[in-house]
């Protein structure tokens, strides 16, 4: 540490004073104070174009390279602020003891907190100029605070004579410095049109180019490539540009404004997931320490503009503020972000949108990484519509990757990995921008049938969440069942809906809670996540809005080992095993994303012919019945031939639930062979106590004639023999046909029963009318639904009477 401090101190002395290796002895003699160079002589009208109290500002860029190793040891940009503290006449030894005019200046920084300039240290020599008519070298110049002469004297006519000063600088400044290890310039020239002076070396690439103000002698622009002694020979690349103020945040352009809000999916590895909201609340200039940014031993103070935001987290129902006034972006005119070995911000969500690739390359390159001691040895910057910026350690696999949108400056993603494991990853919400046709508080009723059981269930949506998945790890964990899509990203976020699940007990008539779990999960690549499809508690009952059956090909393609024939259309998916003829169907409503039916034969991965199982899953309609008369309107939008359809139920009980599903597809693995099946109906009434009357009313469109059809009504497993049974003939007495009104009214008196009623029913038809075209299939569906419900209740009623 002491060696480092000694070397830094040497750097400061050599480059800031530029006289350390010359063993100068500066002493002050009070001859006279003032801007004129001492010695009264007809040829001496030299004087300074600056005065005490003047402030000078330069934007500088330095690169320092060790000649022996070829390594860059320093690379920085800064604003240099100098206050002219005094101009005085002194006698000192520079190319002999002579009288000189000495300009002293103090380097300052802007304390943005206090709103004023503060000094780094004591006044130091900025420029020294003397004239001695009797000396061999009549004019002598020295710039004590840098390799470039910051200010030059004016002549007696207040003009800057660059065609005279070029020789003076070469003879009395650059040549003496070259004797002590600095660059030797063997050529120089000047241009009075732009007040510039150029120094060159004919055998090497060293040069110094300077442009000065014509009326004040202050350097306006300088650039150079020089050798300097700093313990070992060093090369300096330098540019300086005079500016009118020390504001170094005035060129920043942010692509965001106060009030802007954006969202991230976030993980810290493993199974963690956070939904993060960022809201911009302000911009502020602050002062931060910056190491390795100059020739001083300690860190300098530099002004940055910071973007402040509120960071909120999603708790499943709403966002709550986790942190306020959080800095999410730092920048100034020199650096597009803030990074320092002593302090670096936790998060960078925004960068200036006027950042160019060169800004990134100057701050992040193999040299700066080494200077900071950062744990990386490789860097890659790709520019397209984004900046894709990656730094890595090729030995430890430690990697940090950023993707920044160029137009807005908003970070699209940030990834930190080590040994292939994700340590931190956040991504601007993109993959999880999916929505289902359900909301928090909704209750979804559904039925699951299999060879072993038939279960009525309901899911109450309680909150939304998310999940982070490494698909490569999924592939490994699945044992070969799952294969990730090479066109999709390896790291994915999923949006999830969590529900409270209940199962209806048909013996007690009670909904039993069996906990909270995943209900729906998807992202823009997977309308149903593989886990939700094959490993979740709930069956997949919805796909996100905007998805169709065609989007299920990747997901259901995982079953290609079971099914070798597939058809994917907008509202229907068919999977078929051509060897044994077994099929699996999925039907969905493309307008709502609801899966209306999913069922058929399914096998286990690696299973044989004996392990095929039949199952069906479908949503159910729910209506709560209250004391008195309840009129339930049955949806008939899909049936143009039916104009009105109502169910009227009279009960003395309260909070009874009618749960019903109208199906185009057989929920049971047994077919009805008599006639053509119009419709299947699954019905549950959670409590028949107090149930007095059920009336169905169906009014048909004039295009439908009730005389043209013979209908047969069926109920499943009424006798416990796992068969479809036709309704008894006496049940037809309950049907009242009004041919004038072209309507059907079904009167079903019930009463005296207790407990739940559940049944699966169907209706089939035989057309008996004239040979004209049969009305649409959808007409019979609605008719079948209403009629089936009646037959089921009749059958139950008859069974109860027989028991009595």
Image: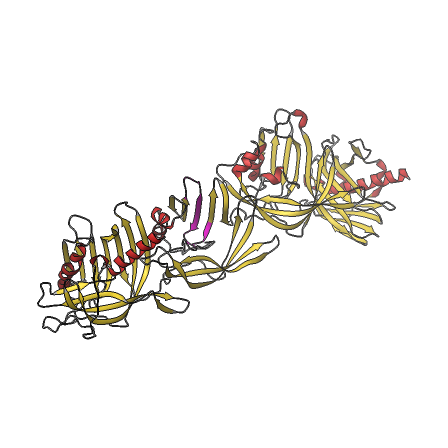
Q: Quadrant of residue 753?
A: top right
Residue 249: image location, x then y, percent = 38, 62
Q: What's the residue at 75%, 31% (across, down)?
A: 674
Picture coordinates of residue 788, whole percent (x, y):
77, 40
Q: Nearer the viewer, residue 292 or 112?
A: 292
Name the residue nearer the viewer: 509 or 615: 509
At horizontal 30% and vertical 46% (from top left) the residue drawn is 71
Residue 759 located left or right of residue 603: right
Q: Residue furthest front?
A: 2
Q: How is the structure coloured here?
A: secondary structure
Q: Position of residue 642 (x, y in %)?
A: 71, 46
**Hey, which quadrant is residue 151 in on the image?**
bottom left
Residue 597's place in the image compared with 244, above or below, is: above
Residue 658 sits inside the magenta stretch = no
Horizontal relation, residue 689 to residue 763: left or right: right
Q: Which quadrant does the C terminus fall into?
A: top right
Q: Position of residue 647 (x, y in %)?
A: 77, 48
The residue lying at 22 percent from left, 59 percent from top is: 19
Of 396 and 702, which appears nearest the observer?
396
Q: Residue furthest right?
A: 804
Q: Can residue 702 be seen from the camera position used here? A: no
Would you say residue 395 sits in the magenta stretch? yes
258 left or right, relative to 159: right
Count of marks, rendered view:
0
Task: Decide if residue 653 is on the left or right side of residue 460.
Answer: right
Tell me if residue 651 can be seen.
yes
Depth order, front residue of 557/712 = 557
Q: Which residues are magenta?
A: 392-412
């Amino acid at each position: 540490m002491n060696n480092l401090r000694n070397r830094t101190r040497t750097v400061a002395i050599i480059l800031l004073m530029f006289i350390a290796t010359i063993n100068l002895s500066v002493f002050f003699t009070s001859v006279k104070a003032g801007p004129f160079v001492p010695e009264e002589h007809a040829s001496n009208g030299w004087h300074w174009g600056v005065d005490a109290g003047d402030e000078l500002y330069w934007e500088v860029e330095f690169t320092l390279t060790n000649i022996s190793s070829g390594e860059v040891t320093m690379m920085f940009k800064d604003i240099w602020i100098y206050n002219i503290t005094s101009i005085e006449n002194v006698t000192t030894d520079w190319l002999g003891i002579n009288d000189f005019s000495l300009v002293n200046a103090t380097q300052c920084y802007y304390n943005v907190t206090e709103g004023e300039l503060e000094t780094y240290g004591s006044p130091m020599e900025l420029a020294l100029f003397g004239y001695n008519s009797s000396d061999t070298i009549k004019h002598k110049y020295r710039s004590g605070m840098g390799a470039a002469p910051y200010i030059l004297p004016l002549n007696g006519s207040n003009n800057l004579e660059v065609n005279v000063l070029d020789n003076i600088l070469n003879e009395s400044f650059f040549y003496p410095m070259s004797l002590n290890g600095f660059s030797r310039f063997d050529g120089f020239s000047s241009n009075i049109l732009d007040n510039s002076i150029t120094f060159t070396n004919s055998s090497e690439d060293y040069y110094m180019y300077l442009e000065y103000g014509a009326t004040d002698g202050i350097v306006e622009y300088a650039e150079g490539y020089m050798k300097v002694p700093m313990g070992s020979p060093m090369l300096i690349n330098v540019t300086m540009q005079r500016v009118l103020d020390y504001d170094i945040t005035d060129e920043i352009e942010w692509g965001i404004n106060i009030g802007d809000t954006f969202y991230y999916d976030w993980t810290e590895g493993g199974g963690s997931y956070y939904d993060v909201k960022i809201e911009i609340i302000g911009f502020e200039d602050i002062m931060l320490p910056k190491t390795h940014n100059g020739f001083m031993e300690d860190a300098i103070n530099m002004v940055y503009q910071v973007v402040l935001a509120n960071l909120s987290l999603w708790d499943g129902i709403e966002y709550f503020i986790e942190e306020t006034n959080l800095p999410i972006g730092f920048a100034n005119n020199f650096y597009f972000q803030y990074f320092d070995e002593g302090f670096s911000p936790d998060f960078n969500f925004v960068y200036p949108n006027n950042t160019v690739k060169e800004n990134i390359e100057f701050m992040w390159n193999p040299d700066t990484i080494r200077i900071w001691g950062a744990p990386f040895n490789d860097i890659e910057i790709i520019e397209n519509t984004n900046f894709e910026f990656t730094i890595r350690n090729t030995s430890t696999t430690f990697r940090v990757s950023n993707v920044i949108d160029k137009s807005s400056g908003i970070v699209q993603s940030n990834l930190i990995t080590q040994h292939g494991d994700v340590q931190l990853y956040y991504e601007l919400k993109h993959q999880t921008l999916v929505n289902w046709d359900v909301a928090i508080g909704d209750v979804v009723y559904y039925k699951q049938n299999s060879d072993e059981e038939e279960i009525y269930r309901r899911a109450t949506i309680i909150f939304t969440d998310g999940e982070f998945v490494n698909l490569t790890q999924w592939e490994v964990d699945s044992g070969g069942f799952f294969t990730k899509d090479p066109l999709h990203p390896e790291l994915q976020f999923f949006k999830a809906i969590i529900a409270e699940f209940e199962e209806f007990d048909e013996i007690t008539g009670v909904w039993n809670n069996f906990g909270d779990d995943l209900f729906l999960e998807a992202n823009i690549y997977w309308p149903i996540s593989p886990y939700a499809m094959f490993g979740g508690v709930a069956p997949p009952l919805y796909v996100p809005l905007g998805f169709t059956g065609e989007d299920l090909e990747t997901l259901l393609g995982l079953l290609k080992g079971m099914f070798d024939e597939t058809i994917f259309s907008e509202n229907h998916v068919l999977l078929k095993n051509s060897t044994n003829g077994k099929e699996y169907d999925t039907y969905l409503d493309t307008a709502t994303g609801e899966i209306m039916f999913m069922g058929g034969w399914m096998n286990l991965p690696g299973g044989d012919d004996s392990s095929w199982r039949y199952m069906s899953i479908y949503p159910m309609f729910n209506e709560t019945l209250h004391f008195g008369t309840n009129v339930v309107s049955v949806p008939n939008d899909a049936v143009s031939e039916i104009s009105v359809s109502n169910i009227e139920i009279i009960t003395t009980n309260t909070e009874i639930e009618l749960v019903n599903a109208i199906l185009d597809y057989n929920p049971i693995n047994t077919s009805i062979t008599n006639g053509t099946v119009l419709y299947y109906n699954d019905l549950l009434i959670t409590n028949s106590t107090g149930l007095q009357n059920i009336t169905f009313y169906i009014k048909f469109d004039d295009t439908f004639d009730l005389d043209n059809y013979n209908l047969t009504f069926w109920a499943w497993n009424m006798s416990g023999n796992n068969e479809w049974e036709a309704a008894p003939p006496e049940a037809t007495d309950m049907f009242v046909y009004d041919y004038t009104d072209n309507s059907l009214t079904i009167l079903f008196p019930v009463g005296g029963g207790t407990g739940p009623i559940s049944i699966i029913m169907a209706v089939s038809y035989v057309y008996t009318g004239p040979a004209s075209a049969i009305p649409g299939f959808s007409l019979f569906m609605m008719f079948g639904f209403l009629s089936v419900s009646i037959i089921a209740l009749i059958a139950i009623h008859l069974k109860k009477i027989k028991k009595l």
